[in-house]
Image (cartoon, helix red, strand yellow):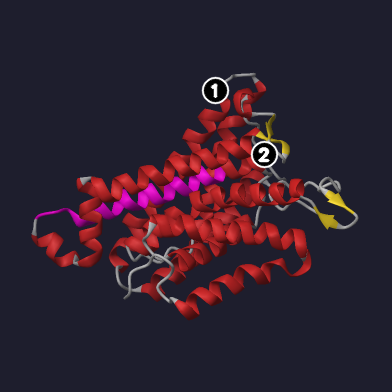
Amino acid sequence: MVNATTGHPLRGKGREGGVVTGSLALTVVLNGLTLAALYFLVACGFSLIFGLMRTVNMAHGSLYLIGAYVGYAVFEPLYDQDVWWAWYAGIAAGVAAAAVFGVAMQAVLLGWMQGQELRQALVTIGISIIVADQLLAVFGGTSRQFFAPDAIFGSTELPIAGRYPTFRLFQIGVAVMVGLALWLLLARTRLGLMIRAGVDDRAMLTALGVNVPLVSLAVFALGAGLAGLGGVIGATAQPVAQGVDARFLLTSLVVVIVGGMGSIPGTAIGAILVGVAEQVGQALFPTYSVILTFAIMAAVLALRPQGILGRPA
């Protein structure tokens, strides 16, 4: 059996006579939660851009790649010099690069296409292809991976599960903090009020004197920066390589559809369902595990088309 989060085999620990024991079951659930944390970091940015701003950004997976590769380009020389803050510099560079690229994309291309979903989708698909080719030309096809700082490296002893990678637990903590910060931003700040008002009535918000294009740029920068953060976190947990952009774009779509567009708590629920289902599927029937994820999406669409916590259209 293979751990889909780390790519390492589960060496029979927790199995007795072909029966899954409590230790292995807890490990699978923890793997699902850590994977869900990564999915949430990437998907909540997609939820902000697609769900709240109604901008179809099919290049969201490319923002993940940009964050990972640019962050690595900053991290690698510093790590070679044994600089203790190399990983933190990589995070800052990855988030900043993804945010700047996202703002440029919104300002130059997507801003004047507001409401033209098909055009936005086609343009951003083209951007994703160009970005993937350019990153391949610069960094090649070799997988790259960050090394976490000593403080969050190694393993932690947990009840029943035994020793578990500390960085995986840190991953969950980052996702929780990001989720709380986003909820406070949208529900308790003036910027959040403007964002929600712009979704409901963009013309009225403009008439009240609010610079709606500037608010849109701020939201796009935030959503793109979160994708870049996910890129660095994800590339620390497992190597990053060409092609993962499509995986994270598809996963973000599924998470947002399941949780509800524009809902941060809904995105968290969707990420947990998808992440845990993916790991349980890998443990029980690895060949057909992907079916479980799409079965969840199909059930939600059939019973509640707007998503678990989404608002009716």
Above or below 1: residue 86: above
Whether residue 103 is visible: no
Q: Is residue 26 left or right of residue 93?
A: right
User: What secondary structure is the magenta-colored segment mainly?
Assistant: helix
- The residue that mark 2 highlights is 145
Observer-nearest residue: 103 or 206?
206
Residue 104: horizontal and vertical position, in percent?
37, 51
Q: Secondary structure at mark 1?
A: loop
Kindly give the residue lying farthest to the left in the view shown: 208
- The residue that mark 1 highlights is 85
Q: Secondary structure at mark 2?
A: loop
Whether residue 92 is visible: yes
Q: Is residue 8 left or right of residue 212?
A: right
Quarter of the image containing the C terminus? bottom left
Q: Residue at x 71, y 53 (%)?
A: 4
Above or below 298: residue 243: above
Bounds of the magenta segment: 209-232
Residue 134: horizontal and vertical position, in percent?
58, 52
Identity, as a three-letter code, of the amino acid under mark 2:
Gln
The answer to which image quadrant residue 19 occupies is: bottom right
Q: Is residue 291 left or right of residue 15?
A: left
How many discs mark residues in the rendered view?
2
Above or below 6: residue 207: below
Please tell me which of labels 1 and 2 falls first in the chain: 1
Quarter of the image containing the N terminus? bottom right
Q: Residue at x 72, y 41 (%)?
A: 161
Q: Residues within 10 Å of mark 2 (few under 14, many from 20)?
A: many
Above or below 213: residue 97: above
Identity, as a three-letter code, of the amino acid under mark 1:
Trp
Q: Residue at x 53, y 57 (%)?
A: 271
